[in-house]
Image (cartoon, helix red, strand yellow):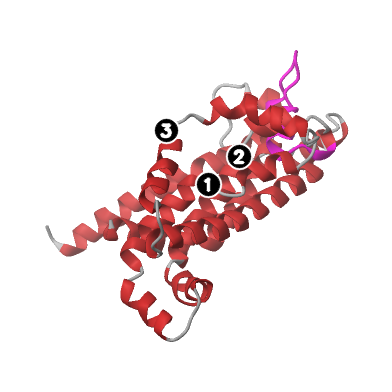
């Protein structure tokens, strides 16, 4: 195939995929900028309307949704849990990957086995624990169980196995570095792409989590953004335009987060695939 023709086909395909990827966000804004009556018409409108600010005002006044409080609660949880996961998961991965201690293989296999257990099975005992500690309607009820993830340990451990050579660790020890200094000065700079990938995945999972926060956070002052959006659904009437307005506003921070770390995210996925 001629190279110019091949480039045209490749770029055309990529452009088409880009349009397909962006269209759901565009369509979300179209619905958010119109009335619910407009969204039920056929054929539907494909251009934005002029009701976006009106729908925002309706969301705050008619539905009494504490949107920005919920947004702040979710941002606090997502940021804290992301930083916590990066720190604790990378420390544990470093220990499993490059430190020698008794029972290392058994403990790592045991951790992997816990990934086979559905998280829903732990909801009842976890709820009982949070009740005993008096953490219902407290953000710590969501914060404490998510400080570290088994997937994060597994992901970073596999990356370190191939990216962090043992010669570097031995050289650092010969220079007098402690284990933590080796981790901080040698390992962390090498695994930054993998940590960026884990940061995005963790942030998105916390931001989109609905089940557990909806169980332990009943007070409107501590609810997360997903619960606030759910509260836009009324029993006898569903205002699609207002619901989509809240969904669109809740999606913006995720887009910002992904845009900031996209380069590191792609590098982490690509290098992880090549090294794997």
Asked whether 121 or 239 is in front, the reply is 121
Which x, y percent locates residue 104? 39, 53
> Magenta residues, as a range?
221-240
**Relative horizontal placement of residue 74, taking residue 168 as reference (left or right):** right
Asked whether 225 or 12 is in front, the reply is 225
Q: Give the CA separation, mark 2 to mark 1.
A: 16 Å
Q: Give the CA separation, mark 3 to mark 1.
A: 13 Å
Residue furthest out toward the left: 1
Give SS at disc 2. Answer: helix
Mark 2 highlights which residue? 208
Residues at badges 3 and 1 in contact (C-beta under 8 Å)? no
**Magenta span includes 191:** no
Give SS at disc 3. Answer: loop
Q: Which mark is residue 116?
A: 3
Q: Which mark is residue 149?
A: 1
Residue 233 position by quadrant: top right
Asked whether 71 or 276 is in front, the reply is 276
Quarter placement of the N terminus: bottom left
């Amino acid at each position: 195939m001629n190279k110019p023709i091949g480039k045209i086909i490749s770029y055309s395909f990529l452009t088409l995929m880009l349009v397909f990827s962006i269209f759901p966000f565009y369509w979300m804004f179209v619905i958010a900028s119109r009335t619910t009556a407009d969204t039920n018409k056929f054929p539907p409108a494909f251009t934005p309307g002029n009701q976006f600010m009106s729908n925002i005002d309706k969301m705050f006044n008619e539905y009494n949704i504490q949107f920005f409080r919920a947004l702040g609660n979710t941002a606090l949880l997502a940021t804290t849990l992301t930083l916590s996961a990066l720190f604790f998961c990378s420390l544990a991965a470093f220990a499993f990957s490059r430190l020698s201690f008794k029972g290392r293989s058994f403990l790592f296999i045991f951790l992997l086995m816990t990934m086979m257990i559905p998280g829903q099975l732990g909801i009842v005992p976890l709820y009982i624990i949070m009740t005993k500690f008096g953490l219902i309607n407290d953000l710590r009820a969501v914060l404490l169980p998510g400080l570290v993830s088994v997937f994060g340990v597994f992901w970073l451990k596999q990356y370190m196995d191939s990216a962090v050579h043992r010669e570097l660790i031995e050289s650092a020890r010969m220079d007098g570095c402690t284990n933590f200094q080796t981790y901080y000065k040698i390992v962390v700079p090498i695994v930054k792409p993998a940590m960026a990938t884990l940061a995005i995945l963790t942030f998105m999972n916390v931001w989109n989590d609905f089940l557990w926060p909806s169980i332990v956070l009943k007070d409107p002052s501590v609810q997360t953004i997903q619960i606030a959006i759910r509260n836009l659904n009324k029993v006898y009437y569903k205002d699609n335009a207002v619901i989509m307005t809240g969904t669109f506003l809740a999606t913006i921070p995720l887009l910002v987060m992904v845009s900031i770390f996209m380069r590191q995210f792609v590098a982490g996925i690509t290098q992880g695939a090549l090294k794997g």
